Amino acid sequence: HYKEDLTNSALGEIFSFHPNYINRIVNEQTGLSLHRYVLKLRIDEAVHLLRTTTLSAREIAAEVGFAITTIFYAISSE
């Protein structure tokens, strides 16, 4: 579900946990905050698609869950 808008609050509601607890669990398991972990998943998939498809960067940004392509460009150039 990494393509969806995942937030601590949204996951907290789904699993009936406090949002801070959700973030702590993700951080303990991955070493990253939920936000950073989701970004990493999206970027990893974007790299894979750039290497293996003929989709444009704009199409890939939308495919991996970046609603605003300028954010995708900014993050991927870090």
Image: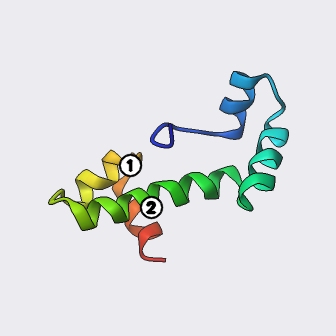
| Residue 63 in the image: above or below residue 73 | above
Amino acid carrying label 2: it is: Ile
Q: Which mark is residue 43?
A: 2
Amino acid carrying label 1: it is: Val
In which quarter of the view is residue 57 placed? bottom left
How would you rate the neighbour count of disc 1 (Cα within 10 Å): few for under 14, some for 14-19, many for 20 or more?
many
Residue 70 horizontal/vertical position (percent): 37, 61
Which residue is at the far left?
A: 54
In which quarter of the view is residue 52 placed? bottom left
Is 21 displayed left or right of 13 in the figure?
right
Asked which secondary structure carries label 1, the reply is loop
Residue plotted at (36% across, 59% down)? 46
Distance of label 2 from label 1 (alpha carbons):
8 Å
Residue nearest the viewer, comparing 75 with 14: 14
Is 55 displayed left or right of 9 in the figure?
left
How would you rate the neighbour count of disc 2 (Cα within 10 Å): few for under 14, some for 14-19, many for 20 or more?
many
Residue nearest the viewer, comparing 25 with 4: 25
Residue plotted at (74% across, 24% down)? 15
Residue 74 horizontal/vertical position (percent): 43, 69
Mark 2 near mark 1, Cβ–Cβ under 8 Å?
yes
Residue 12 horizontal/vertical position (percent): 75, 30
| Residue 39 in the image: above or below residue 26 | below
Is 25 displayed left or right of 59 in the figure?
right
In which quarter of the view is residue 37 placed? bottom right
Asked which secondary structure carries label 2, the reply is helix
Q: Which residue is mark 1?
A: 64
